[in-house]
Amino acid sequence: MNTLQQLKQLIHEKFDIDITTLQADQPLAEYGLDSLSLAELLFTVEEKFDIDFPDSRQDINTLTELAAVIDEALTNKKAA
């Protein structure tokens, strides 16, 4: 399962959003995820993937962007 699929599953489980409606490039706000929900999601993602989001990465608006940040963090973690 790739990162994007894992994120969809996580959002489905955490926020009870139908996984079939989650589109990779749709703004997360369109699913009713406000800034507080997004912060909660990021904390959950950090725990699940055992990564830390840099404070400068607060510009995440879509699942595609979030998956890219996760993949980059995982790559950097492996390289360290």
Image: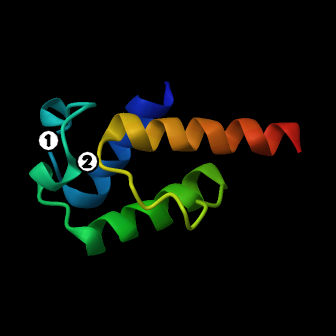
In the rendered structure, the answer to whether residue 49 lies left or right of residue 7 reads right
Q: Is mark 1 on a helix, strand or loop?
A: loop
Q: What element carries label 2?
A: helix
Q: Name the residue under label 1.
A: 18
- Quadrant of the image occupied by residue 75: top right
> Hey, which residue is sitting farthest right in the picture?
80
- Closer to the camera in the image, 49 or 60: 60
Three-letter amino acid code at the position of disc 2: His
Q: Which mark is residue 46?
A: none
Q: Residue at x 60, y 49 (%)?
A: 49
**Horizontal and vertical percent for residue 45?**
50, 55
> Hey, which residue is sitting farthest top in the picture?
1
- The vertical placement of 51 against 20, above or below, is below
- The mark that comes first in sequence, 1 or 2, is 2
Q: Do the residues labelled 1 and 2 touch (CB within 8 Å)?
A: yes
- The vertical placement of 9 against 23, above or below, is below
Circle count: 2
Q: Which residue is drawn at 68% across and 41% down?
A: 74
**Horizontal and vertical percent for residue 30?**
10, 50
In the rendered structure, the answer to whether residue 78 lies left or right of residue 6 reads right
* Crowd class of label 2 (few under 14; some 14 to 19; many from 20; radius 10 Å): some
In the rendered structure, the answer to whether residue 14 lies left or right of residue 75 reads left
* Crowd class of label 1 (few under 14; some 14 to 19; many from 20; radius 10 Å): few
Q: Which residue is drawn at 54% across and 62% down?
A: 56
- Quadrant of the image occupied by residue 47: bottom right
Q: Which mark is residue 12?
A: 2
